[in-house]
Amino acid sequence: MQDSAQDPTQPSRFVLARASLGLASVAVSTALSMPRRVVESAVRLPAGIVGAGARTYLHVIHTVNELAVQGDAVIGAILPPKEENPEWATFDEDVELAEELRDADSDDGIDGFDAAETEADV
């Protein structure tokens, strides 16, 4: 009679026993590492949730901004922008121009009177 350990085509008589011992060993090592895994998971879980929330928030904001840019393009195509400045807006060029006009007006006046005011009164 041949030994089954030497013949690879024949299953070993103790395969189920060895597999059962291997399964028991894995179960024991998993059970022993469970407290460590639970603590690690408990520590990582809040950070993971916060990270996922922040990632989702940024993705939503990015998508909303892309849609707003596309909406601006549509509005710009339908209603072309006006070139005039609103009366409530003050620009640097306007301030400089007003100062230049004020300086020019003060040079034209005599004794505090403005030449334009004098002509308008006449």
Image: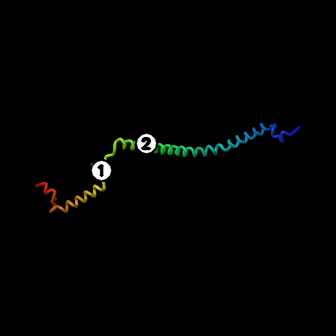
The residue located at (34%, 44%) in the rendering is: 80
Judged left or right of residue 2, residue 25 is left
The outermost residue toward the right is: 1
Locate the C terminus and report the quarter of the image it occupies: bottom left
Up the image or down, 3 lies above or below 96; here it is above
Query: Where in the figure is residue 22, as x and y percent of width and height?
Result: 74, 41
Mark 2, residue position: 67
Q: Is residue 3 above or below residue 118?
A: above
Q: What residue sits 50% from the left and 43% below the top?
A: 56
Picture coordinates of residue 12 (x, y %)? 81, 38
At a point 42% along the width and 43% down the height, the residue shown is 70
Query: Which amino acid type corresponds to the residue marked 1 in the rendered image?
Result: Ala
Quadrant of the rendering where the N terminus is positioned: top right
Q: Nearer the viewer, residue 111 or 93?
A: 93
Secondary structure at badge 1 equals loop
**For the point 30% across and 54% down, which residue is it?**
91
Question: Which quadrant of the structure image shows residue 42?
Answer: top right
Q: Mark 1 points at which residue?
A: 89
Q: Which amino acid does label 2 sit on?
A: Leu
Residue 43 in percent (x, y) is at 58, 46
Mark 2, secondary structure of its residue? helix
Of 17 and 81, nearer the camera is 81
Q: Which of marks 1 and 2 is nearer the N terminus?
A: 2
